[in-house]
Amino acid sequence: MSLAKNIFAMLLVTGSLWGCSLNQSQKEGQPGSLAGSNWLVESIDGKPVLTDSEITISFAEEGRVYGSSSCNRYNGGWHIQGQELEFTHMASTRMACPDSLMQQETRFLQVLNDVARYQVAGDGRLMLETSEGMTITAVASGKAE
């Protein structure tokens, strides 16, 4: 097997094991299975995040959530019970940005505010979903904002 295939196989196994450990802690009812994780948003309700913009979600240990929503910063609280996820007391800075970023940011914050459940997919992506079926998809990121 080539070196590239070996590296790919190791990454695939590592990602799968990480996803399984996250799912196991959720099954065991451990609070904060998302605690300490950082995510980079890829899509909002099926639409990819604009090029040259970054939307992040960081789940702090003490039940706080924060990140970048395109051009502004946001923060608030979070709580999970099983697969249910609730964001509370959300606040955001209010800097003006180009219209396209402001529209993306508004859409992200609206969907985030309405999130009702989450799951970590088999490929390691975080899927946040509202009761109406709107979604936010994110990939793990090693850095907190």
Image (cartoon, rainbow, N blue to C red):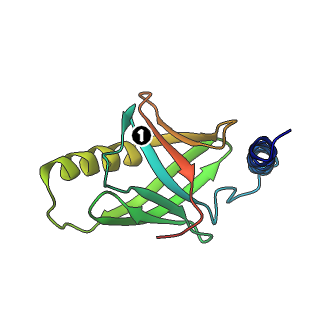
Q: Quadrant of the N terminus?
A: top right
In the image, what residue type sits under mark 1? Ser
| Nearer the observer, 84 or 55 | 55
Q: Is residue 47 left or right of residue 18?
A: left
Q: Residue at x 82, y 48 (%)?
A: 28
Question: Seen from this angle, which residue lies furthest right?
Answer: 1
In this figure, which residue is indicated by the disc labeled 1?
43
Q: Position of residue 34 (x, y in %)?
A: 64, 56
Q: Is residue 129 left or right of residue 118?
A: left
Question: Seen from this angle, which residue lies furthest top?
Answer: 133
| Nearer the observer, 133 or 136 | 136
Q: Position of residue 102 (x, y in %)?
A: 19, 52
Q: Callout 1: helix, strand or loop? A: strand
Please state the total of marks drawn on the protein image: 1
Q: Position of residue 50 (x, y in %)?
A: 30, 46
Q: Residue at x 35, y 64 (%)?
A: 74
Question: Seen from this angle, which residue lies furthest front?
Answer: 2
Q: Quadrant of residue 48?
A: top left
Q: Is residue 130 left or right of residue 96?
A: right
Q: Quadrant of residue 84?
A: top right
Residue density around tag 1, few if under 14, some if 14–19, many if 20 or more, within 10 Å: some
Q: Quadrant of residue 56?
A: bottom left
Q: Residue at x 42, y 64 (%)?
A: 67
Query: Is 78 above or below relative to 46?
Result: below
Query: Is 130 above or below relative to 56?
Result: above
| Nearer the observer, 56 or 7 | 7
Q: Position of residue 127 (x, y in %)?
A: 55, 39
Q: Residue at x 37, y 42 (%)?
A: 111
| Nearer the observer, 15 or 110 | 15
